[in-house]
Amino acid sequence: MITVNDSAVQQLKLLLADHPEAEGKGLRLFIEKGGCAGLQYGMSIEAAQPDDTVIDRGGVHFIVDAASVSYLQGAVIDYDDGLSGAGFRINNPNAARSCGCGTSFEPAETAPQTQG
C-alpha cells in the first residue's frame, strides 16, 4: 500500500486547479533507470491507463504504473516546502540507499526491471 499525506493532496489540488487542461488527470509516479543511485523517481501529470494503480485521496488521483508498483510498496508520498526546496517527496522503505538530492535510490532487493 502507498500512503499519501494530506500535504501532497492539498498541493496536487492547487496544481491541478491552476491547469484546466489537467482535468481528469492525476500525478503519475514512476521509477526509471538513472540517477546517481541506479533508479530515479519521475512524476508527471497524466491520465490513468488500464493497468495503473490509482490512489484516490481528497478528490485527486495519484497514479502508479504496473512496473513501478513493487518499488513503491509501503512508500509515503508527501509535499515539503522546506529550506532544500519545495516539491513532492517519496519516503520509500524499499530503498537501500538514496542520493543526497532525494530523487534517486538503490532498491533494497532485486525488483522487476523498469521501463526506460
Image (tube, helix red, strand yellow):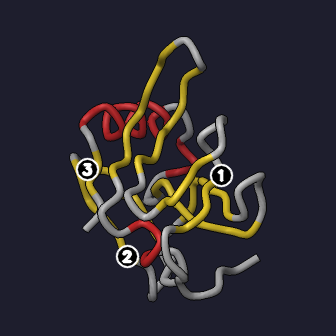
Q: Which residue is mark 2?
A: 53
Task: Give the quarter of the image for residue 70.
Answer: bottom left
* Residue at the image point whose x is 55% and y is 23% from the top: 86
Q: CA distance from mark 1 to mark 2?
A: 22 Å
Give the crowd class for mark 3: few <14, some 14-19, many >=20 residues within 10 Å. Answer: few
* Residue at the image point whose x is 69% and y is 80% from the top: 115
Q: Which residue is mark 3?
A: 59
Q: Is residue 88 above or below residue 38?
A: above
Q: Which residue is mark 1?
A: 104
Amino acid, disc 2: Thr
Front position among marks 3 and 2: 2
Q: Is residue 17 above or below residue 66?
A: above
Amino acid, disc 3: Gly
Can you give x and y, in whole percent of width and height, for residue 98 in the image?
Answer: 58, 48
Q: Quadrant of the C terminus?
A: bottom right
Local secondary structure at mark 3: loop
